[in-house]
Amino acid sequence: MAPKKKEERPVGLTAVMVLAALAVFLGAALAFSSLAVDDVREVNAPPPPDEREPGQAYWVKGDPGTGTQRWRTVRSGILTGFEGEVVLSEGDVNQWSRAHLVPGTGTPAGGDGDEVRPPTLFGLRASATAPDFRIEDGRLHVGTTLNVAVPGGDRRMVYQVSGTLRETADGLRFRHENSLLGRAPLGYVPVLSSVFAREVRGLFAALEEAGEIGPHLRRIESASIEDGELVLVFGPEPPPAADEAAEP
């Protein structure tokens, strides 16, 4: 007697839709990953439109700031409670960044007795170069190179973000307008740009400078970009909280 053939069940519409959505998601993820690791060319000025290579991504660097150490005087004043207006050029900010925002150098903000874990980006071990700052068209542009440890080896990606500054009750804040990872625009995925920015900031959170200069940012009463320079107005130290004032 011949064996009874197994009946094939028809594939339901729900299963087809799930498979199609999965295929679209995987395709988009692979495309995004490819764009994220694309080579980005570093330049000192944006090339003319007719000289740009098709498909080439560019990172326009800010003024490196050479020949002056004015930023050291400004930083010292901020740390000692200076009140009033501070004007910083691109070069001032970039010299400060190279001196104090290099992950892996200096004493971690956690202190000598605390165990400092290696920084991660979405759970993957990562590092970043000192941020580069550029001021153009009333906006602040920030870029850094990320090195992320992924299966198969480290990946180098250039992260660029631009936006404006605003003062809040908690201090100076950066309002994102757009950001790129390699050639991949992060703004196309809802919430991804802000989440990614938070993860990148976390790479710098353990720096000694974060613990030193961070509290003073709460004293900023106004922040603006005028004539290609960053203008900050520092107020007095906030009064102690009621519970702190009550302590003997």
Image (cartoon, rainbow, N blue to C red):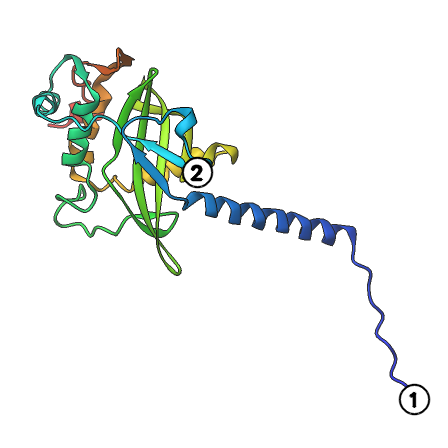
> Which amino acid is tagged 2?
Arg
**Is 60 placed above or below 230 here?**
below
Which quarter of the rendering shows the N terminus? bottom right
Place of residue 231 in the rendered image (x, y in percent of width and height, measured from the top left): 23, 14
Q: Is residue 118 left or right of residue 197?
A: left
The answer to whether residue 17 is seen in the rendering is yes
| Residue with the most extreme bottom position | 1
| Residue with the most extreme right position | 1
- Residue that label 1 marks: 1
| Residue with the most extreme front position | 50
Q: Nearer the viewer, residue 157 or 97?
A: 157
> Which amino acid is tagged 1?
Met
**Is 152 placed above or below 74 here?**
below
The mark nearer the N terminus, 2 or 1, is: 1
- Residue that label 2 marks: 183
Total marks shown come to 2
